[in-house]
Amino acid sequence: MDLEEFLRKKQTSIEQVLASANEEGQLVEEDTLIVVGSLSEGLATLKSDMDLILVTDRDPKSISKNGSIAWVNGKCLVDMEIVHRAAVQELVTRFKGWIQGGWGKTFAANFSSEERKLLHRYLKGIYLDDSDNKKQNQIVKYDEIELSRLKLHCARHTARSIQVDVVGHKQRQDYRSITYAAIELLGHAIDALLASHYITNPMAKWRSRLLESLPDIGLSELDQRFKSKNADDIVWHLHKIPEHTPQAILEQAHEIFTFCRWVFLYAEIKLVHPHVFKFFKVITNFPLPNSDNIGYSTLPLLEFDVDFHINDDEIFMARLNEFDEVLSLSSTELSLVMQFNGKTHEEEALSNVFQKKIGVEERNTLNKLLKAFDQTGLLAKD
């Protein structure tokens, strides 16, 4: 539902809202009024409020002691937050400084959830009485790619902590905590996937609606087995509580972690390291008849805390917080390792990467990987 349709059903109009906002806030020419929230993004329902942000050079408390004003216009509840322009400028400057600082997942970005929401709202809001975009350009000094990186960073940083926690849960045989943590991880992977499509809304309540809006999951750029699959259907399948047995819980968790690892890899390549697309060995959908898999082992699973790191043209894998050996992988090796999902047969994985060019050298590549990952403790020991 767009803004005009919403206001019509609420028996008011943008002109009436603007007039009442002028009256309630005693607006002056330098003020900036922005429609934000679900109404600015086509997510509103008839139960939605109309959220406004008033950016002003005046002291917000001189306009309202609470820093906001609410009123009813027609049958529409209007809620106007008042923000000093200096606070907006400080937030935007700090964000630009974070962007210029480069990419790193070790430390958390110093932005609260409210600040991330504001950065998104300034970028995606509808600026009223601003036909030449002058007021918007005074505030928004960043783009959706930069803000998508912040969303990805927050998802990646939190996800890495969850990965480490889950290994601890497994050691303690705390299987219920594994399930809850895996589902939490899935939520952060959704954020990363949305970020890879430049959807910067950070609010968890819109994850499902926003997933439905994706025209394509995108992961087929790395693995063609994801081609024609809908992101919302995959997530719906994964977002469930398994039977309360260790085996069922670990299987469900590994399925979630395998999918999340693909999402994080894709999102990071797209938003931070796009040059990797040029040399990445894309996994093809090259299934073999079941008879061809007879006698070949199923590939193992990666441990929950195994993560990747990209540095220029190099790709590394290691366990988080273990400080053991780090493995350097070629693009071809990474494509093989990303099929360590406990389901894909060795011959099928080789076919997906090398297709019909499978010989002694190709099989040796996979065998060396299996040995190296086993020796360094990167494989799951359930």
Image (cartoon, rainbow, N blue to C red):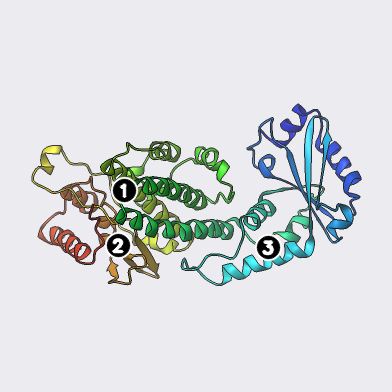
State the separation of the CA atoms marked 2 and 3. Answer: 36 Å
Q: Is 165 drawn above or below residue 186 in the view shown?
A: below
Q: Is 360 drawn above or below residue 204 in the view shown?
A: below
**Residue in view at x 35 percent, y 50 percent:** 257
**Amino acid type shown at disc 1:** His
State the separation of the CA atoms marked 3 and 1. Answer: 41 Å
State the separation of the CA atoms marked 2 and 1. Answer: 23 Å
Left or right relative to 87: residue 197? left
Q: Position of residue 231 (x, y in %)?
A: 43, 41
Q: Nearer the viewer, mark 2 or mark 1?
A: 1
Local SS, label 2: helix
**Residue in view at x 28 percent, y 68 percent:** 327
Camera-nearest residue between 216 and 338: 338
Q: Position of residue 330 (x, y in %)?
A: 28, 65
Look at mark 2 in the image and give the residue it sits on. 331
| Label 2 vs 3, first from the N-terminus | 3
**Residue in view at x 26 percent, y 57 percent:** 337
Look at mark 1 in the image and give the residue it sits on. 254
Circle 1 crowding by C-alpha within 10 Å: few under 14, some 14–19, many from 20: many
